[in-house]
Amino acid sequence: MPRISVTFRKVFSGGYLSIQTFLDSFNVTTGAIGSTIVRTGYGFQPKAFIIWCSGRTEAVDTVGAFSQAMALGFGTSTTQRVSVGVHSEDNAAAGDADTETTVVACLVVAATAGAVDGLLDISTIDADGITFIIDDQFTKNVRVFVLAFGGDSISNAKAGNFVKNADALNQTVTDPGFQPTIVFFVTGRAAAGGTASMLTIGAAISSAKQGVLCSAAADGDATMETKRYCNDIECIARFSAGVTSITHRATFVQMEATGFTIDNIESPETLTVGYLAIAGGDWDMGNLLTRTDGNDIVVSGLAFQPNGLFFFSHGTAESVADTPQDHDMKSVGAAVSPTSRGSQAMSDQDALADSEVAAGIMFDAVYHRLDFADGTAGIMDLKSIETTGFTTVMDDLDPDAAFVLWVACGNVAAAAATDPALLHYNLSNQLRRHRVEMVPM
């Protein structure tokens, strides 16, 4: 028999342990229902994605007064998707704000009076990207960002929803059907649609690694009532209907064999919460502070080299638990390299006689903070990615340090390749290339 030499080098350097990411950006068309948008060039078949917009349509960096139509959604298949969209009208004599939630599309853009300005769904998940389909015609061609995840190390992914209990007890969610490595959250109002603009974005890996961003604007108030809230000790939060206090709060407890457990520390009524659960890959989560100078912001100590980063912030100091801060402000951004990044942001000012709302889009930043003159207050960009972290820098200095949550993903650490089942799988694939079959003894 011929002598066969097998190397494990590819097992330890990535191979079947990789997680792949791609950041896409495009304008949704105003085509008729059933129109498709084919996106390619991802380099892999996505297994999960996050999609978001501010309602702006520009394909270049833009900021200014704008009636916000921010939305964020998750998708993993043609039957697994969820989204929350909020609307707040600029220059209105009384607050004109709404929220829409859907479990039949990956992106819902809300309008005034409970109307929908567009629904984007998944037509197919393709070998090299995603084909989207218009389920409800858009009134304008909003610009969206898509952060997609794929690769052999992702063993399972699901976008779904659950009903958060109306009690202050631990709640185990088994809807995913597998043990996630990370869970992202999105929610709005308790009902499917309704007055007040409320958007919550959260994420959790463990009880020690979690975070939430929640912002809201009241509807119908002669004097604007807008608030924000962001910290790293909770994963779900939501304001009261009048946007005067926080009435829903949950902390993350742990991952379970078929899902995850949260602790409903404040929960006066049920609340529908969307989630994106992903099993596999290496993930980490933390926070950083923006700077008032041009010095680097270094995040280190990760167990892997990031190839995907997601950022979300309310543009000010971290919130004290159960204590809202004035003004509805949020920034959502992502990057897969120092040359592929983007963010969308908005502001809705508090305590004004007439509403003043603004929105911005940046194609060369991961964080964007608006000022109160419908302009830019601060911009943070990704400078570099290191073997155990990443470095950001302020392209436009913040007036004061702002709290920013980040989520990072990367290839599974080499040590994970010592799992016997995984070693057998990889060795089998290498031997198969030599036309040698492994058989049980």
Image (cartoon, grey):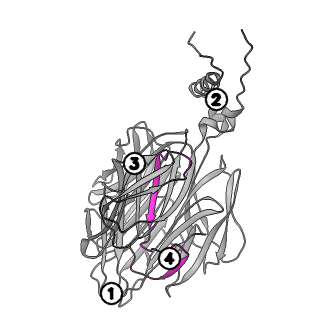
Secondary element type, mark 3: strand
- Measured in 3D between alpha carbons, the distance from the residue under mark 1 to the one under mark 2, in whole angstroms, is 61 Å
Q: Which residue is mark 4?
A: 360
Secondary element type, mark 4: strand
Q: Nearer the viewer, mark 4 or mark 3?
A: 3
Q: Nearer the viewer, mark 4 or mark 1?
A: 4
Secondary element type, mark 2: helix
Q: Nearer the viewer, residue 247 or 335?
A: 335
Q: Is residue 266 above or below residue 377?
A: above
Quarter of the picture containing the C terminus is: top right
Mark closest to the chain's N terminus, 1 or 2? 1
Mark closest to the chain's N terminus, 1 or 3? 1
Give the residue type that dot 2 points to: Thr
Name the quadrant containing residue 157: top left
Give the residue type that dot 4 points to: Gly
Q: Which residue is mark 3?
A: 124
Mark closest to the chain's N terminus, 4 or 1? 1
Residues drawn in magenta:
41-68
Q: Which residue is mark 1?
A: 92
**Does residue 45 show up magenta in the picture?**
yes
Q: Is residue 221 above or below residue 146?
A: below
Mark closest to the chain's N terminus, 3 or 2? 3
Name the quadrant containing residue 391: bottom right
- Residue 369: x and y, percent? 54, 76
**Does residue 142 show up magenta in the picture?**
no
Q: Nearer the viewer, residue 115 or 196?
A: 115
- Measured in 3D between alpha carbons, the distance from the residue under mark 4 to the one under mark 1, in whole angstroms, is 19 Å
Mark closest to the chain's N terminus, 4 or 3? 3
Name the quadrant containing residue 394: bottom right
Q: Nearer the viewer, mark 1 or mark 3?
A: 3
